[in-house]
Amino acid sequence: MADATITASNVVPSSGATTVKVVFGEAVEPMQPLYKKASDSLYYLADANDSTKLPVAGFATCSGSANQVGAMVIQDDAITPGFSIGAGDVYILSTNAGGIAPIADYASGTILTTLLFGIGNNKAKIAIQTSGVAKA
């Protein structure tokens, strides 16, 4: 399978979402998973192949460039993620920086980080959890 194809204009946090202001360290798009780099406190694209680009802190809610202020959603029980997601579907951090992949793509060498659980009607619950170890 392939990473989710996100339509940026369709990414909509629910009214109950928790968002925070952040400063991006590189170009980002809505719904891309981000991590905070300790050395500069900026937010970059997370990557399941690189433990230095973890843990996932949240998802960008807007497009932005390096050193630009933006927003990140860190909790939401009913986000519209901008791609088709069914009830019970599980999505994880991709091996492509900033990508979201179906759990079926979990492969050897990948550090498992769950991101989203489908709840129906193309909505998802944010459920960020990093295992911290790569699959053998």
Image (spheres, rainbow, N blue to C red):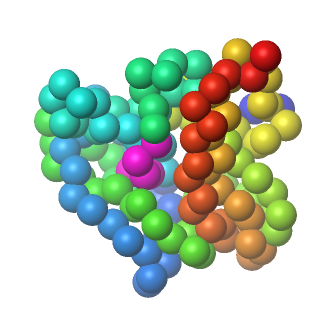
- Name the main secondary structure of what is drawn in magenta: strand
What residue do we see at 16% from left, 49% from top? Answer: 69
Asked whether, in this view, residue 41 is left or right of residue 79, the answer is: left
Please tell me whether residue 58 belongs to the stretch shown in magenta.
yes
| Placement of the C terminus among the 4 image quadrants | top right
Q: Is residue 97 visible?
A: no
Image coords of residue 83 (percent x, y)? 66, 55
Image height of 72 relative to 102, above or below: below
Give the farthest residue toward the bottom: 15
What residue do we see at 71% from left, 61% from top? Answer: 117
Query: In which quadrant of the rendered view does residue 15 lie?
Result: bottom left
Please tell me whether residue 128 belongs to the stretch shown in magenta.
no
Image coords of residue 105 (percent x, y)? 79, 31
Asked whether, in this view, residue 67 is left or right of residue 108, the answer is: left
Asked whether, in this view, residue 116 is left or right of residue 29, the answer is: right
What residue do we see at 81% from left, 57% from top? Answer: 89
Which one is in front, 90 or 1? Answer: 90
Image coords of residue 113 (percent x, y)? 62, 40
Asked whether, in this view, residue 135 is left or right of residue 38, the answer is: right
Q: Which residues are magenta?
A: 56-60
Which one is in front, 4 or 53? Answer: 53
Image height of 133 relative to 130, above or below: above
Tally of numbered tags: 0
